[in-house]
Amino acid sequence: MTPAKSSAPPERPWTTGTAPGSVPLLGHTLELWRRPLQFLASLPAHGDLVEVRLGPSRAYLACHPELVRQVLLNPRVFDKGGVFDKARQLLGNSLSVSRGEDHRYQRRMIQPAFHTPKIAAYTAAVADDTRAAIGSWEPGRTLDISDTMHALLMRVAARTLFSTGIDEATIDEARHCLRIVSDGIYKRTMAPLGIMEKLPTPGNRRYDRANARLRQIVDEMIRERRRSGADHGDLLSTLLRAEHPETGKGLDDGEVLDQVVTFLVAGSETTASTLAFVFHLLGAHPEVEKRVHAEIDEILEGRSPTFEDLPSLEYTRGVITESLRLYPPSWMAMRVTAAETELGGRTVPAGTMILYSAQALHHNPELFPDPERFDPERWLGDRAKEVERGALLPFGAGSHKCIGDVLALTETALIVATIASRWRLRPVPGTTLRPEPKATLEPGPLPMVCEPR
Ligand code: HEM
């Protein structure tokens, strides 16, 4: 998945521009609100660094991969402010929202929980869980693949985190709460004034209840695990035993709770949406699906996939990478300049919002020829080496790069291989994919018909 061509600054001066279509008072806010994906994908045509007006404020979208790297590799200047400050109040001071020294400290403590041998252990039961979940599928049955993947992913996430000791009903309840909480966090961090969420509306009460219940479920798992002292080799046990390599200090229960809720918010919907997009793309491209089936049949010879099989499933991984390119779940993110700085030849004052967008990078024809075409072969052999470094960015980069990237890719590949070795999913005629850019890019309802292979 690592492209190889270098992304040195272009041998020309940086180009800067302003997004077209600004209207008085609102600037580009309406464009960004009404059709964000198309708007973002249109901006690289206006420069390497493009100014966007958000009401009275100026923000900049870094469009060239090298400028995106400069932003993401310099967290002291391009800091997590703005929406992250609001998210901190909702998620606690967990890894995804912490800043500076505090973030570096947390990351060093938690990173070992995501080392490859750990991930191999956490995901040992993914194929079994997937087989159990698809055990009730019947030939000719129509299911909403988005919803089905969300339910499955919640089971897989629960197993990864807690291995045992959480029953089906609690997993369903956690899933229900998580959807409300994720949606609520997104709305609250995006709300300009921060007043509406304080009113006692039915929606706000629903959010408060779901948030309290989700945290209660996780809290009970932590207490039980501390009581028993058992090491189940899952993510929760690893977090409870985590120690900072220099200070030897661990995480207290409240800190573990915040991290686990963050993993659920950051990791479940992103991975579930990726799976739904993959099955949609396979259903729409029978020739690609055929190659995936042939590869899976050849490598697995009828048995369940394991972590060790994944390097051999090269074409299947190409399909997943290409799906993440076309439909990046994390479609836009931001930083705020902590001091006046220079970016793309422009002086940017302190406190300026800098955006980067996987959607804008991945759909840029300068970086990906024929960008709307689903072409998994972009990621195979020499063609993969042609992709400019930093052009593919589904998991971000730098010190805030997704800590769950390998886990997410492992779960996705294991689930795709398990399902595709038994079932083919046909799109219901007349269904149109309409990706919904919310906290993550969601596929929306996608009815598909099960056909046994
Ligand atoms: C396909 C699935 C996933 C995608 C596309 C994704 C994407 C991302 C991206 C783009 C970032 C960086 C955001 C930024 O630059 O501000 C990020 C950060 C993060 N992700 Fe993921 N993610 C996925 C799965 C997961 C999973 C499975 C977990 C945990 C179990 C996870 C936990 C996190 C955390 C904790 C951070 C913050 C890291 C830090 O700031 O140090 N993600 N993710």
Image (cartoon, grey):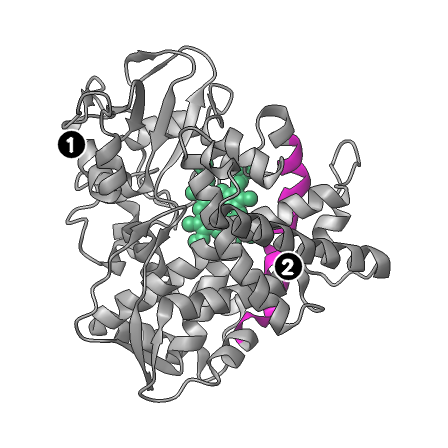
* Residue 221 to residue 397: above or below: below
Q: Quadrant of the C terminus?
A: bottom left
Query: Which region shows up in magenta?
Result: 105-127
Secondary structure state at the residue bearing disc 2: helix
Q: What's the residue at 67%, 58% (across, down)? A: 217
* Residue 194 to residue 143: above or below: above
Secondary structure state at the residue bearing disc 1: helix
Position of 248 compared to 349: left or right? right
Foreground of the two, 74 or 380: 74
Labelled disc at residue 119: none
Ligand 1 within 8 Å, label 2 CB: no
The crowd level at tag 1 (other Cα within 10 Å; few <14, some 14-19, many 20+) is some
What amino acid is at disc 1?
A: Ala
Mark 2 or mark 1: name the one nearer the start of the chain. Answer: 1
For the residues labelled 2 and 1, the Cα–Cα distance comes to: 43 Å
Q: What's the residue at 34%, 89% (across, down)? A: 139
What amino acid is at disc 2?
A: Leu
Q: Is residue 445 magenta?
A: no
Foreground of the two, 432 or 24: 24
- Residue carrying label 1: 45
Dominant SS type (magenta): helix
- Residue carrying label 2: 161
